[in-house]
Amino acid sequence: MEKKYDVIVIGAGHAGCEACLASARMGLKTLIITLNVDSIARMPCNPAIGGIAKGQMVREIDAMGGEMANITDKAGLQFKVLNSSRGPAVWSPRAQCDKELYSVYMSKSLQDQQNLDILQSEASEIIVKNAKVCGVKILTGETIEAAAVVVTTGTFLKGTIHLGKTFFNGGRFNEKPASFLSDSLIKDCGLTLGRFKTTTTPRVNTKTIDYSKMTEQPGDENPRPFSHFTEAQTWRKNLKQLSCWLTYTNPQTHKIVGDNLELSSIPIGKVKSKSPRYCPAIEEKIERYPEKTSHHIFVEPEGYNTNEVYLNGLYTGLPFDLQQQMINSIAGLENAKVIRYGYAIEYDYSSPLQIKRTLEAKTVENLFLGGQINGTTGYEEAASQGFVAGVNAGLKVLGKDVLVLGRDESYIGILIDDITTRGMDEPYRMFTSRAEYRLSIRNDNADLRLTDIGRQIGLISDDSYAKFEKYRKTVKDIYAGIEENLLITDDELTPWSLEKAKEEVYIHKKYEGYIQIQEKMANKMKKNEFKRIPDDFDYTKVDSFSAETKQRLMEVRPQTIGQASRVHAIKPSDIAILTIYIEKIKKEKKQKRDEKQD
């Protein structure tokens, strides 16, 4: 084991994998530390990638040179575009994956990557000197030096698993938690930690299911790969799609759950932390919506070579015997046998108000946080943050300008701006409704929006970028009506195609008028968006601010006027006052400089 690296990444889930690959591909000597090498990029919840707004983020990661979309194309077993009956602005790709293949392919990607080492161990301490990260201590007591550290610990920080009234330590079922790092993040890094929880569903044996009582949910007839860099025609020929199935809970199911709420760990048990609002346990659904007589249950395969299927919508913390009763009350699952039971997991997270929009901690220099440690939920939200954290750790070490994505240019920018500006009191999940510029930041144009950024960072190869430039020129020519350029062949554009270019132009023209209005709004917003606020600005000294305004702004410490305007409870009048103060400070500084020169 080497003793010195440019970047160390702690945790090898979806955030950690994107972080370490980005750093290593930028030419930085990188180490990823994981509790178990066999668990890299595990999919402990639903083995699916994408979905509403999530698919857009995966496409954005891919456009900038990330890995999630590429692995999804290799491991996917069903591909669908959600919201396809609505407008292209909300089309969202989703893929059901073979969970074992996904982990294997991602693990191989890490192992093959130059500049990247993998270490199976537990990180127990962040080494900090003079408010700056300088390394990591592992459980054996050895110290590994680093110029930057990225923490992507998922649900493992002091993880506790709950099954009914039984609970025990674990980061995932049958996997040990990270028991020591939380204390170091508090003591050495000055962070405040809280507790969140999430749940997963039972898995049952497909051989014990009566699918004749369910509705088949096949994949798209003409599926589209996730990655911009996957050659679609060859990929489709090799793809074998499996169907998902739809069934429903019923009054009997609800009675079993409702009569036994006191035995669950979810609503009134020992788990007191907040769970994801938009991915609730069945116990929470029945409590919140007593008028509903049924809820969707999607029966989804977990792989080509396993009989396990995932009961999407049946997240639970009930004891084993009640889970079995609940499952057997559902149409098609009357004789279903459980292979793995569902459970709740509680874990430490760090309020994202403690990090900058680069995902660097405000309390310690060169410490970056990505994924569920920032209070988000979902593989895609985690991977997006991991990618940005890894890129910015690398850029910081290289002494280059950091990456801050705007709300008008990506869903990833919206995600990071939301959590670092507004914070949260429950796990954050991305939706298209959070995007005020969703007409222009669609899944279909992620490459046109972000590939140049990936190229500037150093994550897009010469060959890929040359092909992308041909595609972009073709799009521009079609839009301009230059007919002779339509003679270009798909072979010259691959992995893009002439059909894709024509579709892109069609979608853009469909929304063109609305996009122009959005661009005007975005340009107007940008006047204040990038007006810097001094890092040491003392909001408590602004007499015109209310006590709440002072408290909110001191807590978030926004970096720009635009970010300050989005802080919870901040009024337009507060922003006007703040702008005047910032201008006043600038004038005073300029006056002092002029006096010195005189």
Image (cartoon, rainbow, N blue to C red):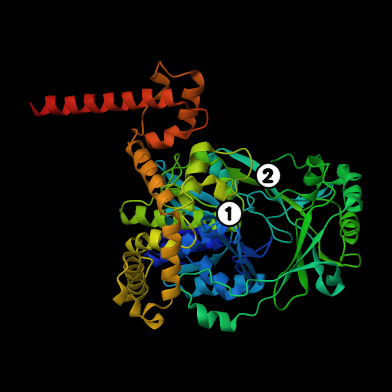
x, y percent for residue 188: 50, 42
x, y percent for residue 574: 42, 24
Are the two marked residues, 2 and 1, in contact with CB atoms closer than 8 angstroms?
no
Q: Residue at x 50, y 28 (%)?
A: 552
Q: How far, Cα to Cα, is label 2 from label 1?
A: 22 Å
Q: Neighbour class for label 1 at 10 Å: few (<14), some, many (≥20)?
A: many
Label 2 secondary element: loop
Query: Is residue 391 visible to us here?
Result: yes
62 w.r.t. 413: above or below: below
220 w.r.t. 22: above or below: below
x, y percent for residue 307: 78, 74
Q: Left or right: 73 with respect to 171?
A: left
Q: Which residue is mark 1?
A: 153
Q: Left or right: 159 with respect to 40?
A: right
Q: Residue at x 47, y 60 (%)?
A: 60
The quadrant of the picture occupied by the C terminus is top left
Q: Which residue is mark 2?
A: 277
What is the quadrant of residue 478 in the picture? bottom left
